[in-house]
Image (tube, rainbow, N blue to C red):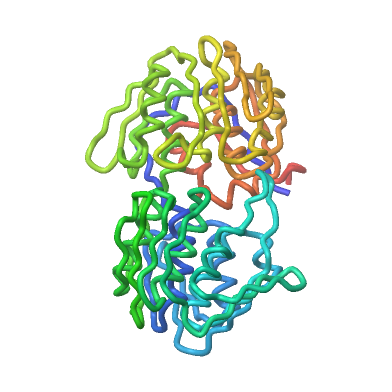
Amino acid sequence: MEQIVIHGGRKLSGRVQVSGAKNSALPLLFATLLAPGTHRLTNVPALRDIDTVEKLLVTLGAEVRREGDLFEVCLNGKTETTAPYDLVRTMRASVLVLGPLVARLGHARVSLPGGCAIGARPINLHLKGLEAMGAEITLDHGYVEARCDRLKGARIYLDMPTVGGTENLMMAAALADGTTVLENAAREPEIVELAEAINAMGGKVAGAGTDTVTIEGVDELRPLEFTVMPDRIEAGTFMIAAVMTQGDIEVVGALPDHQEALVSKLEEAGAIVTPFDGGMRVQGTGTIQSVDIRTRAFPGFPTDMQAQFMALMCLANGTSVINERVFENRFMHVCELQRMGADITIEGHTATVRGIKKLLGAPVMATDLRASASLILAGLAAENTTQISRIYHLDRGYEQIEKKLNALGARIERCRADGV
């Protein structure tokens, strides 16, 4: 079992390049199922979740070629319509094959993804939307099956602005007969990018980035050629690293339009944030002020940055209140931060963080992807040495993060937990 060892207390400085966005690359890769032919995506990050997508696409009949950040998907033969449990269980985003398969081939059989470490994320809104478009949905032996000769456009109100549901229904509607309107749709940048990709394939999507998305179905789509945008969560993690270590980092790929909520809170905490062409420079100022946050759907403060921001608040002057409103079980990193000396109490969906002068290195365990990042940030700022185990979570969403941080002046190494 691998672990990451961090020798903390070093200021970080320099320039870092953000990798392609995991949460955009995943739906874009699944969107290739909407059209036969050869699709080419660039700036695709090298992550465990991307490896899982590759395996799933191959299982469905695609030929895949990867070279650096290029991901080529060839769909010239028969496309299968069953996504098996062994793959879907390792990555919840696999459910995004449902919409494209039923839209193009009239049938999809996908293993139910179940819950995950940060809480259950049901797909009932995905299924409700597909039923409104004419699909017959059945549940059998842990699989959801959708059938429809051709989906029909519909007006669909989403009870909550689900990102995955919006993406699945956008892809399904792209080949439907007629016009589909998604109301209370998610507004995340990844939704906008998927709409741009569908339009690049010959689709007709309007309104992405607002709460009403309109998709006019077309008879067929052409292969996709597209470049994945930078990862806003990775960018935000480096931005917080600059403040926690009282450093000075230029984050190439940190896009101001994607980071407004985080930038506002970092500036409130005392950081200096300066945009430049293609990124943002973040400087610590010697003092961290306490700041309250409440996670919300975009453009609110992202739940995927909550754990990292909590790590920052552990070193703030005063008390901060962190309210998690997106997922019901996203405070599992708290007990690990407490092992490093953090003063945090939890009541329901709210964590109260009383700032301390310093964190102390300790053996800790990652519980999910973003918790992993929060522990790395804490380790960077802590005195002495921090050992983080179960780092396979980290490799799902951060491409070579230890190498990038070492280039900024950190001392991090990846090694076997037994010292081998």
Expressed as whole percent of the image width and height from the top left, the position of residue 41 reads 38, 67
Expressed as whole percent of the image width and height from the top left, the position of residue 247 reads 41, 24
Establish if 349 lies above or below 227.
above
Expressed as whole percent of the image width and height from the top left, the position of residue 246 reads 43, 20
Residue at 77%, 43% in the rendered image? 418
Q: Can see residue 240?
A: yes
Q: Can see residue 51?
A: no
292 displayed left or right of 363: left
244 displayed left or right of 226: right
Which residue reaches farthest bottom? Answer: 77
Establish if 278 lies above or below 191.
above
Expressed as whole percent of the image width and height from the top left, the position of residue 238 reads 44, 35
394 displayed left or right of 34: right
Residue at 62%, 24% in the rendered image? 351
Residue at 58%, 83% in the rendered image? 80
Establish if 360 lies above or below 373.
above
Which one is in front, 112 or 117? Answer: 112
Establish if 409 lies above or below 91.
above
